[in-house]
Amino acid sequence: MSFLDSQWQGRLELLLAAGRAAGADLVEIFLERFDRLSVLAEQERVTSVNPSLGCGAGIRVFHGAADGYRDGFVSTTNLSDEGLMQALDQALGMLNLQRGISNGHSFAGLNPLSNYGSSKQNWLTQCPGVQTSADRLLEGTAKLEQHGKHLQARRGSYSRDWQEMLVAASDGTFSRDLRLHQTLGLSVLAADGEHRSSVARRFGSSDNPRDLIDWDADAAARDISASSATMLYADYIEAGSYPVVLANRFGGVIFHEACGHLLETTQVERGTTPFADKMGELIAHESVTAIDEGLSPQSFGSLAVDDEGFEPQRTTLIENGILKAFLSDRAGELRTGHARTGSGRRQGHSYAAASRMRNTFIAAGPHSPADLISSIDRGLYCKVMGGGSVGPTGQFNFSVEEGYLIENGALGKPVKGATLIGDAETVMPRISMCGNDLDLAAGFCGSVSGSIYVTVGQPHIKVDSITVGGR
Amino acid sequence: MLNPQQLHDQLSTLAKQEGINQWDLGAASGTDLSVQVDRGEPKQLKGAQRSAVTVRAWTSDGRVGITSSTDLSIEGLAQALKGAKEASVFGDLEEPPGLSCRSLEPLIPLERPRLALQPIQNLLKTLLDAERQLLDLHPAINTVPYNGLSERNGESVYINSLGSQRHHLSSSSACYLYARAEQDGRKPRSAGAVRLAYGSKQLDVQACIKEAAELTISHLDYSAIDTGYYNCVFSPEAFLDLIGAFSNIFNARSVLDGLSLSNRDSLGSTLAVPFLNLWDDPLHKSNLGASAFDGEGTPTAPLTLIEAGNLAHFLHSEGTARQFGVAPTGHAGMGSKVSVGPDWFVVAPTPGIAAGDAQLNRHKADGVVWIDSLSALHAGVKASQGSFSLPFDGWLIKNGERISIEAATVAGDIRKVLKTILALEGEPLVTPGGMCPYVWVEGLSITGET
């Protein structure tokens, strides 16, 4: 049953009123329905087709301004009146509140529905079906065979995630949206004797039913094949400290991991960010301006409304090296005082929303990529980045998928096995040059509220010195 | 509570109506409670009621389709079966999975307690006490930013059109405490500990507090390490994490897909030093997550993977076993393409052979790196290439004394690691993910932060 069905408003208002009457300061209910499809092609065959359907609710209760707004959260896949009331009772009970014992809090009813999904009703049917998806993936693996050498395995994968969400809260918030995320991956494993290379690329978009249909399989396959051939015979990099140029697009994962997570109010609440009391201070090189926004059309991290019913904003996090803002959700605003930025996000109904990044990037600078490389006598060029993570003390690490030595201001031989390690406070002041070629790339971010769709990005940037793990 | 007989009857009826002769179903449901605290206050209290069902349906020519849903009602089952039938049109005819020939075999009985969930306020009180105790143990420990105490009751069901009806009930509890310590003019340090049990009352929270404190304090006086090659001694957890990241070596699915470091002819080949044995022991009494059957209803049982240094067996699903001409081993998931994976590794010395250099002792070593825990395995492991470059927490041992390493990575190749093991020190120790002794490895590349 669609959340547009008129009975939902009445059902939700009953729950919210009951929660308020029991003494809750705020009650929020998040509902979702999802329809997902994943398809896998290997070599010349489609080897897996997985449809998945589901629904669920997450009920969150806040209580106790004097105690920093404690909260209880309960999720359920039972959307009956009984199931939802049971979840509410459990969430209230976590805060020693009980329905039926009135504490006199009133509920004024929900605002008129803000329906962000009204123009998106046909998106699901406009997406490619299984046959079209399979055909396009097989085209991709065939192109890999055409362009690649020494390929031992070729894979193409597609996943479509359609979600209807409805969020209602006792402050009147009442919003609905339809969301569509699609991802497409191509990967190869090349082998020649003892030499091996594995290369993967992922593409992703939001709100674009034609994404897979319009995908340029040939260009993607050429790029991956070239990268695979280059890395197949690459030597391991010698460990040490190097000046590094990070390429644009997914190179932005360094900022995401090293700094972006530390600018979420979730980290301020925990006391795990060194930047908590540095608003208005210089925390990065003056050449660095960093943005997080949820507005770019069809970007993977964009959203019409966040998972708490708040419209996303363009948030300047760092301007010319100076800390300007944190990313904040409802709990972050209540507990840290940083105003909400439309960054309350969650993987699904079984997670409470938290302050999370959306499309995060370092702004373009004045230099050409060639300027950055030519400024280095001996260093490392990270053309393609892999994944990474940040630890509880702000230490980050991430792997380099495709790297080249820089020798005498020019690109040298390819190298593999590099891992960049450091911490944000040390590295951010070392970003000394920003290129003029800002570009974004889709990715997934896993954190307290689950795995979410994000975009990372940057122009080419130069880090004066960073520790590179190798052999 | 899931009812396998009822589910079987319902799906049999629905399948008949859809003209489906071969089908199977996996379902799971559970209830979770968890708490987190922050400096003496509740941080978050969470509860969840979960349910999920996966249905597979075969066409008459052997193609399989699958659909998953959160809806366990009869309407949900009907929708899932219909979806699976529609998806079966796209099933793979070259390597279709089938029903496991072992799905009707009797199961090895699992005698595990099924405990009732505690009231969440009890969990909260336990965790608040634990946090306070940990904060009181050392003045430099100022927060415990990552902490949690959880309980879960779950059940899973597997049924199929051959008549298999499997049902598993489980309960589990976990406690983790990761403390953060700071000293003037120095970088913050963090370390922690985890404990698992069948219920929160059985958790050894005091041991968790003690270990978290000792580890955190041990990392306060840290130094940078010079980049170079060092003999390393891996903690049981760290070595099991490394083996787990390269489990494609033993995975028949990966072998068939060309993504393994092994190939079909690798059985019997030398993988490791002769004094190393490794087996998967899903039913080990210390494996709290044990299940008596896998995603295809095949009984689980111990399986030797490395025997005296040689590759002994692969992990199999029904489909891979059929291709190799062997029996399924009970390591399958459930899917239209069935995944294969290990459950619970045990590393131990080969009986009758000295476990390497008996003189090696991490408490008396000099110039050796003690790797306590590895991180970012998802990013730093190239499983199909065999290489790794991973950040770690650990110590440089100098004249038997541990000096915490500021920040460093360890890099190498798993094939070389297994063949350059110097010794297995001490008896295998139980960890959440398996059993293993301390493992000495010769000459790994360590990069220190400069």
Image (tube, coloured by chain):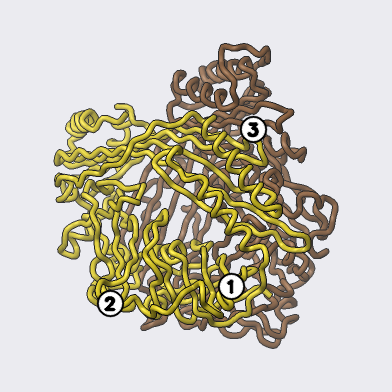
Question: Which image quadrant: the N terminus of chain A?
Answer: top left
Establish whether labels 2 and 1 are both on one chain.
Answer: yes
Q: Where does the C terminus of chain A fall, quadrant-wise? A: bottom right
Q: Which residue is mark 3?
A: A309
Chain of the residue that carries numbered disc 2 in the rendered image: B
Q: Provide the residue designation for mark 1.
A: B401
Query: At x 38% / y 75%, what residue is drawn?
Result: B418
Q: Colour of chain B?
A: yellow
Q: Amino acid at mark 2?
A: Ile
User: Percent position (x, y) of residue B168?
Assistant: 28, 39
Q: Nearer the viewer, residue B104 or A207?
A: B104
- In the rendering, what colour is chain A? brown
- Residue B437, quarter of the rendered image: bottom left
> Amino acid type of disc 3?
Gly
Same chain for the residues under marks 3 and 2 in the image: no
Tell me the mark number nearer the camera, choosing from 3 and 2. Answer: 2
* Pointer 1 local density, CA inside 10 Å: few below 14, some 14–19, many at least 20: some
The one nearer the camera, A62 or B79, is A62
